[in-house]
Amino acid sequence: MSMSVIVAAASEGSTGEQFTFWTCAILSVIGALGLVLSRKTVHSALFTALTMLNLAVLYIANDAPFLGLVQVIVYTGAVMMLFLFVLMLVGVDSSDSLIETLKGQRLIAVLLLAGFAVLLILTLGTALTGTQSVGLVAANEEFGGNVQGLAHLMFTTYLLPLEVVAALLITAALGALVLAHRDRWTPKLDQEALSRLRMERYAETGAHPGPLPNPGVLATSNAIGTPALLPDGSPSELSVPPPLRGESRSRLAAETTEIDADVTEVREIAEGKETMRPKALRDVDGHTDLAEVYPEEKGD
Amino acid sequence: MPELSDFGNDPFWLVCLKTLGVFVILVVLVLFTIWAERRVVARMQMRIGPNRTGPFGLLQSLMDGFKLALKEEIIPVTAHRAVYWLAPLLSAITAFAAFAVIPFGPEVSIFGVITPLQLTDFPQSVLYVLAVASIGIYGLVLAGWSSGSTYPLLGGLRSSAQMISYEISMGLSFVAVFLYAGSMSTSQIVSSQQSLWFAVLLAPSFVIYVTAMVGETNRAPFDLPEAESELVGGFHTEYSSLKFAMFFLAEYINMVTVSSIATTLFLGGWMAPWPLSLIPGINSGWLPMLWWLAKTMLFIYLFIWLRGTLPRLRYDQFMAFGWRVLIPVSLLWIVLVSGLRAIREEMGDTSNTMLAVGAIILAVLLGLLLLATMRRTRVREPDIVEPTGPLSPQAGTFPVPPLPGQTFEYTPRSRQPVAGATTSGSQEEPDA
């Protein structure tokens, strides 16, 4: 292959290059739009990750493999993952509220956008017209490789900015730690102290100190809200998990009568007084009427 | 030894062939690893393990795979469909993709084309493995989130926290290797270990890597994301059939991947171990694949051994170990290694001075360690009050049997004490 062919191929872009560019460009724009337009915050985060990945591929395709890989490791792998982490912790299904809490944020956003656009245009303009480009291949070869070249620049020309940015990042991390930190004023309750507390509470109020009884598993239902039955046949409210207790308190009596009815029914079936067809269905797809479940027997 | 310029020249059919080869090697290794794990753990627990299907039960995992793929698939109603589909794919694809830069051997001739036994390589290929692994974490986290259920969510969160934490120490353990190899490409790191393995030269890095790789693959004793006793099955609780099989596959491929990374970076890759390496010509042709396989299997055996031996860590202990021990130690080690390299490059060979300085540093460290242990032995005396006197069952405590030296006050209901029911024989016997 002669030199002129290579130059021609590079200026027009080979088929592979074209394919990579158009695929990644379209995908990253889709990701950027998805970030803004998604209702769910987790979807937004995923679209951001998509954009980051495609940008990384573009960096690699443009002879900057180190930048591309570090972008994936640091931004996609760590920063975006922490975002996801927080979003998931905050709420599995929390959608953004549409009420604006920051006053005048749109105006500020537009101003900032204008400032950013000016900076971007100026920088791009200087880079495109003012700077003489040697090309990445030549720049990479100067110090024997992409990583070596970057390291050389970082630790000579740009040493001070690098250190300043590092100090800034560390300050931000420490600031976050300090803001999130809360001093403990009382000693931490260990296992021993907790058990003592339980015993004291038992002595004072008679609160049960041991583990609570398991929920009951009965003929009609094995749901966690089903109360266990005490030896005298009365339902034990302690066996129901606290969130279900209030509701179940009113249902306890009803449940017991239903259970009694079921037991009688089963007994009758066993004694041959009754056929196996249910008299009433409580839970078949929300139907309570037998005729709805067995429509062909409507005429009976 | 293959050079970096030897890569990227393969014809298209050879690239396809190599890709297929990597795929087949991985799948077979996974099937073998599952079988080996069950057999070895069984032997450690005085059982036999699967021995019915095929010779020595070797076909057991293949049959299990078929069964798993044909099982009924249940998708929870609360699942977020698109993400639920995406998660296992992400996990499995990234697991396979990471293997593209693992060197299996030197240059060989495949149908007349001289080519290295490695799919591809480039100057930053170890970073590529880290990048692909960090995308793989998305599979786990998204699986946990999209299931729309609590246990998977907790498992997914745990796995993301765990893998990010341990990826840091993993990445730091690579730094010393990069410094000594002068390259981030897997094939060049292997070539630079011709005289001495980095596991010997950079032993602390090796230890840190081996610890981090167990954390990174969610294996026992660091298998907190799928702690059965706390989280049912972890992030894949709501997955079934082929989608679960994908996660299963990905987990075992990741095991093979981190094992072969350890082999490549620290144990000389495909090069024969020391006494064998003296035989001329042993490191050429197809034979080195055998050494690669043996070393990788050694690490896989280590995984199985750990699982058969160690109980699971508590979550806070595990995170504290990662952040307070592994990362600071790695950072210190990197500073030490780069300091030594810098001194050697600036001042030439100063072995004797360095040895002396090293001895002084070691002595100081030992002194500090001794001080720390002495301080730790000054334990606060526990203020145990020996209970004496009569014990009333209702006096501020839950009814418990009396301690030695205590007497028991009987409630009116229990007229007759049961013989031998109390440890103390000194109490007054109530009248019958």
Image: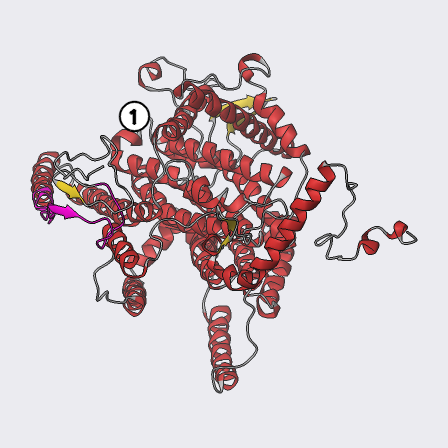
Magenta span of residues: B373-401
Residue B296, given in percent of the width and then of the height, sits at: 42, 26
Where is residue A23 drawn, in percent x and y? 64, 55
Q: How is the image coloured?
A: secondary structure
What residue do we see at 41% from left, 18% from top?
Answer: B46
Task: Judge from the rendering whether residue A130 lies leftward or rightward of residue B17; answer left or right.
Answer: left
Q: Residue at x 58, y 59 (%)?
A: A253
Q: Nearer the viewer, residue A19 or A260?
A: A260
B376, A170: nearer the viewer: B376
Res B124 visible: no
Badge 1: how crowded within 10 Å, few (<14), some, or many (20+)? few
Q: Is residue A172 left or right of residue A221?
A: left
Q: Mark 1 falls within which chain? A: B
Percent from the top left, x then y, of residue A88? 49, 59
Residue B75 vertical position relative to residue A158 in the rendered view, above or below:
above
At 55% from the left and 22% from the top, the residue drawn is B109
- Looking at the rendered structure, the secondary structure element under dot 1 is loop
| Residue type at tag 1 | Ser
Return the residue nearer the eye: B332 or B231.
Answer: B231
- Residue at the disc numbered 1: B195
